[in-house]
Image (spheres, helix red, strand yellow):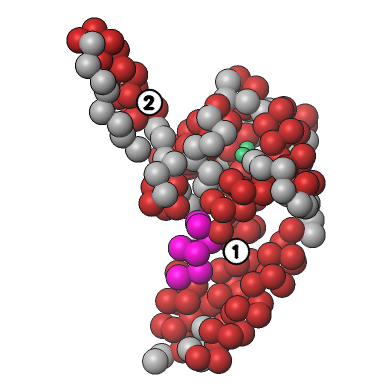
Amino acid sequence: MNPVLSQSLSFLAWVVYGSFFEWYWHNLWMHHPRSPKEAFRGHTVVHHGLYRGDDTYFVDEEKVEHILLKPYALPAIVLVHLPLILLIEKFLPGTAIGAVLSCFLYFVVYEYMHWNMHVPRKHFVERFRWFQFLRQHHKLHHRYMMKNFCVLVPLADYMLGTMITEASLARQKAEREAALATGSTPKRRK
Ligand SMILES: [Zn+2]
Ligand SMILES: [Zn+2]
């Protein structure tokens, strides 16, 4: 296969993997006190303690604290995945560079996006509708901690049934109210 194509396909496959990785890491380590407990303390206790799903979600640039992950997180994530990347390279040559690049860029863009989601400052990225969607997606996570685990690519939230939007919340509320009014059981929806 053309090496540019194989590296590009590898890059995209690792972006998809990245969505599931951030879902599992965010859910199982950042929101459950497993070892290393620093992940839980730094995220659930400190980050969610400072920034909630209300006006405190936004912070002035000069008052920012505890938004970015620890500086060792980036090399740690790349190193943890390196054996798997090299194993795949053995069977599917021409994929490792795309994979490493994907891990690196996913992390950097994640940090950049998460920062901008909490810090409104008329930065150019805030103009895009997809950014506003992701910002609202993450704001709902700060209101409902066990929903919307993905910050950057919400594919895993969608696939694993943890995705909520203002529209889905309004729909559920309307269904609950209709059920209360008629005395029937509301349909369960993901
Ligand atoms: Zn956040
Ligand atoms: Zn969280």
Q: Dominant secondary structure of the magenta stretch?
A: helix
Q: Residue 46 at what x, y percent from top left?
A: 75, 33
At 38% across and 26% down in the image, what residue appears?
A: 169
The residue identified by callout 1 is 105
Q: Looking at this view, is 103 or 86 the one in front?
A: 86
Whether residue 17 is in magenta: the answer is: yes
CB at disc 2 and ligand 2 closer than 8 Å: no
Q: Nearer the viewer, mark 1 or mark 2?
A: 2
At 71% across and 28% down in the image, what residue appears?
A: 49
Q: Quadrant of residue 31?
A: top right
The residue identified by callout 2 is 169
At 56% across and 75% down in the image, what residue appears?
A: 99
Whether residue 126 is in magenta: the answer is: no
- Which quadrant does ligand 2 occupy? top right
Q: Looking at this view, is 110 or 176 the one in front?
A: 176
How packed is label 1: few (under 14 Cα within 10 Å), some, or many (20 or more)? some
Above/below status of 15 relative to 149: below
Residue type at numbered disc 1: Leu
Q: Which mark is residue 187?
A: none
| Quadrant location of the C terminus in the rendered image | top left
Q: Quadrant of residue 74?
A: bottom right
Left-right relation of 18 to 182: right
How packed is label 2: few (under 14 Cα within 10 Å), some, or many (20 or more)? few
Q: Residue 117 at what x, y percent from top left?
A: 58, 38
Query: Dots 1 and 2: beta carbons under 8 Å?
Result: no
Residue type at numbered disc 2: Leu
Mark positioned earlier in the residue sequence (1 or 2): 1
Q: Which residues are magenta?
A: 13-20
Left-right relation of 176 to 33: left
Left-right relation of 170 to 46: left
